[in-house]
C-alpha cells in the first residue's frame, strides 16, 4: 500500500473479493456508491476477481468503464482464496478507512455508515459488523461459531469477527508486511492492535447462488488460524506423547506387580492390537501436525505467492504489488 498524494487520497476504500457473483456484484457496487455519495465521502471501490469461473470479470470491466474514477477492477490469475484476494485489494486501497464486505448482498451496503461512525466515535482501529441474525445453512452457522471461539481464544478478543469490517489505513498498512501465502486477515489485524470493536448490523438472506464457503474451506480457515498464530497443536502433541508414555509406564508397573505376585495371566492378542492401534494412530497424528508446520515453512521459503494479478483496470500506472511495498 503506497502512500497516496493528497489529490488522490480517498475517505473510504471498499474492497470486495468477487467469486461467482456476476448476478449480484453490480447491485452491490451501485448501492455502495450511492450510500457513500449520500454521506458526502470521497470513495473508491476495489473489486478483486478471485479467479471466478463465471463472467464476473466482464461485469467488473463494465463497472469500471461506467465509473472510471470510482471503480478499480483487478483480475487474479487463479483462485487464491478470499483472504489473499483481500490482501491484494488492501495493497491498492487509498482510503483513510478501508471497508471489506462480501459480494452477495448479505452485507447490506446501507450498514457501512454504522461501521464508520463506530470507528470514529469510539476511536477504534478495527470495527466488525456483527450480524444480528445469520442467514446461513445450519452447518455453516455451526462452523462460524467454532471459528469465533477459536478466534476469541487465540487472540483474546471479546468480539465476533466477520468479513464485514472497517479498518483504519494505518492498521491496514501494518499487516501488509506479511506476504506469505497462508493468510488469515483477522489474525493479522488482531496481532497489531487491541482497539477492536463490533456493531450490530443486518444480515440479509442470500437471493442468488450458494455460498462460496464449503465445509472444506471452513476447515482450511481453521487450520490457517491454528498453525499460523498458535503453537497449540504442537504443544498438544507433546502432552499426548507424555500422556501415552505415562500411561505405558503405569501399565508396565501394574504388569510387573502382577508378575511378581504370580498372578500374571497369559496375555491375549486383543490388548496388544489395541495398544498398537492407539499408539500408532497417535504417532501418525503427531507426524501429521508436525508435517503441516514443516510444509508451510517449505512453501514460504520457496515464496509461493500470496496472489498474482493478471490485469487491472484503473490506475494503470501503478506497479502490480504481488510483494509488499
Image (spheres, rainbow, N blue to C red):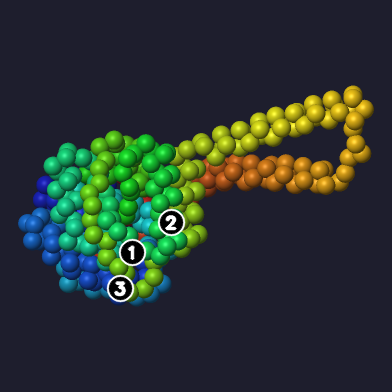
What quarter of the picture does the C terminus occupy?
top left
Assign a secondary structure to mark 2. Answer: helix
Residue 201: in sight, yes or no? yes
Quadrant assignment, res 76: bottom left
In percent of width and height, residue 164 lies at 28, 54
Q: Is residue 219 above or below residue 77?
A: above
Assign a secondary structure to mark 1. Answer: loop
Query: Which residue is drawn at the image coordinates 11% and 47% (left, top)?
Result: 6
Crowd rating for badge 3 (residues with CA inside 10 Å; few <14, some 14–19, many 20+): few
Which numbered disc covers residue 207?
A: 3
Query: Does 271 sit left or right of 18 as displayed?
Result: right
Query: Which residue is drawn at the image coordinates 8% and 57% (left, top)?
Result: 39
Crowd rating for badge 2 (residues with CA inside 10 Å; few <14, some 14–19, many 20+): few
Which numbered disc covers residue 93?
A: none
Which numbered disc covers residue 142?
A: 2
Disc 2/disc 3 C-alpha distance (Å): 21 Å
Query: Which residue is drawn at the image coordinates 70% and 29% (left, top)?
Result: 246
Foreground pick, 221 / 254: 254
Assign a secondary structure to mark 3. Answer: loop
In percent of width and height, residue 150 lies at 43, 44
Which numbered disc covers residue 135?
A: 1
In percent of width and height, residue 47 lies at 28, 62
- Is mark 2 in CB contact (under 8 Å) with mark 1? no
Query: Does 74 sit left or right of 67 as displayed?
Result: right
Disc 1/disc 3 C-alpha distance (Å): 11 Å
Label count reads 3
Amino acid at each position: 500500500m503506497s502512500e497516496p498524494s493528497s489529490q488522490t487520497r480517498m475517505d473510504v476504500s471498499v474492497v470486495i473479493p468477487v467469486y461467482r457473483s456476476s448476478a449480484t456484484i453490480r447491485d452491490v457496487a451501485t448501492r455502495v456508491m450511492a450510500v457513500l455519495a449520500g454521506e458526502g465521502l470521497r470513495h473508491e471501490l476495489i473489486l478483486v476477481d478471485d479467479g471466478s469461473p463465471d463472467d464476473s470479470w466482464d461485469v467488473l470491466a463494465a463497472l469500471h468503464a461506467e465509473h472510471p474514477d470510482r471503480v478499480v477492477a483487478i483480475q487474479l490469475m487463479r483462485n487464491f482464496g478470499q483472504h489473499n484476494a483481500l490482501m491484494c485489494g488492501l495493497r491498492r486501497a487509498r482510503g483513510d478507512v478501508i471497508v471489506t464486505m462480501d459480494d452477495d448482498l448479505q452485507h447490506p451496503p446501507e450498514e457501512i455508515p454504522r461501521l464508520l461512525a463506530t470507528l470514529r466515535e469510539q476511536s477504534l482501529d478495527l470495527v466488525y459488523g456483527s450480524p444480528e441474525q445469520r442467514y446461513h445453512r445450519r452447518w455453516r452457522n455451526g462452523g462460524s461459531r467454532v471459528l469465533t471461539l477459536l478466534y476469541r481464544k487465540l487472540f483474546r478478543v471479546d468480539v465476533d469477527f466477520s468479513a464485514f469490517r472497517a479498518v483504519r489505513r494505518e492498521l491496514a498498512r501494518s499487516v501488509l508486511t506479511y506476504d506469505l501465502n497462508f493468510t488469515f486477515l483477522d489474525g493479522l489485524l488482531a496481532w497489531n492492535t487491541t482497539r477492536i470493536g463490533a456493531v450490530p448490523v443486518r444480515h440479509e438472506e442470500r437471493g442468488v447462488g450458494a455460498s462460496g464457503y464449503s465445509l472444506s474451506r471452513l476447515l482450511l480457515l481453521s487450520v490457517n488460524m491454528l498453525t499460523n498464530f498458535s503453537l497449540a497443536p504442537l504443544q498438544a502433541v507433546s502432552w499426548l506423547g507424555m500422556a501415552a508414555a505415562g500411561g505405558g509406564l503405569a501399565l508396565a508397573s501394574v504388569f510387573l506387580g502382577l508378575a511378581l505376585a504370580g498372578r500374571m495371566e497369559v496375555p491375549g492378542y486383543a490388548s496388544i492390537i489395541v495398544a498398537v492401534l492407539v499408539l500408532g494412530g497417535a504417532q501418525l497424528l503427531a507426524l501429521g501436525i508436525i508435517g503441516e508446520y514443516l510444509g508451510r515453512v517449505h512453501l514460504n521459503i520457496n515464496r509461493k505467492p500470496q496472489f498474482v494479478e493478471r490485469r487491472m483496470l484503473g490506475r494503470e500506472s501503478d506497479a502490480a504489488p504481488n510483494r509488499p511495498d
